[in-house]
Image: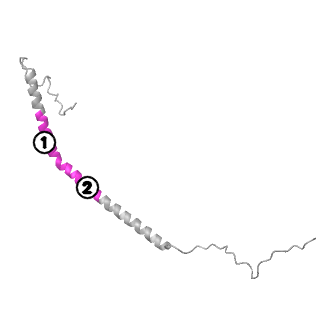
Amino acid sequence: MSAVPQQELPRPGGFPEIRYKRYIPKVGPSGLVLFSGITLMCTLGLYRTGQGNLERRELEREKVWSRIHLIPLLQAEADRDTYRRETAANEREAEIMKDVKGWKAGESVYNSKRYTPQNFVVVP
């Protein structure tokens, strides 16, 4: 009744070798190629940024000079508008005060020459 235990043995010729080393295939570009590509991209980006800065600076200079050259035209237009408004205000004043003796339209109501009327328009 007592059976002899049978031990398991390897097959004839043995088991195949187990690969335990790390096996990473060499795929993709080398480190030198990656470094060269990144350097090229950074150089190109900085070059384009520099060119954009030059263009932006030139556009800003052009805008400033166009404003400088437009100032006399805008000032003359503002002067004509101020004169037109002042003339219209004097005509309205003359129409309103026509029944008051001794009233001169457009003349200062102050006894001092220090006061000068404001030269801007308040738009409601």
Residue assigned mark 2? 59
Q: Position of residue 103 (x, y in %)?
A: 7, 20
Which quadrant would residue 116 be assigned to in this image?
Answer: top left
Q: Which mark is residue 76?
A: 1
Magenta stretch, residue numbers: 55-84
Residue 93, compared with residue 71, is above or below; it is above
Quadrant position of the C terminus in the picture: top left
* Mark 1: amino acid: Ala
* Mark 2: amino acid: Leu
Residue at image location 28% in from the left, 59% down from the top = 55
Residue 40, compared with residue 72, is above or below; it is below
Q: Main secondary structure of the magenta part?
A: helix
Label 1: element kind: helix
| Alpha carbons under labels 1 and 2: distance apart | 26 Å
Labels in figure, total: 2
Whether the magenta-drawn stretch holds residue 81 is answered as yes
Q: Is residue 36 visible?
A: yes
Quadrant position of the N terminus in the picture: bottom right
Label 2: element kind: helix
Say left or right for 38 vs 17.
left
Whether the magenta-drawn stretch holds residue 115 is answered as no
Residue at image location 26% in from the left, 53% down from the top = 60
Dot 1 crowding, Cα within 10 Å, few <14, some 14–19, many 20+: few
Q: Position of residue 105 (x, y in %)?
A: 8, 24
Residue at image location 22% in from the left, 54% down from the top = 62
Q: Is residue 106 visible?
A: no
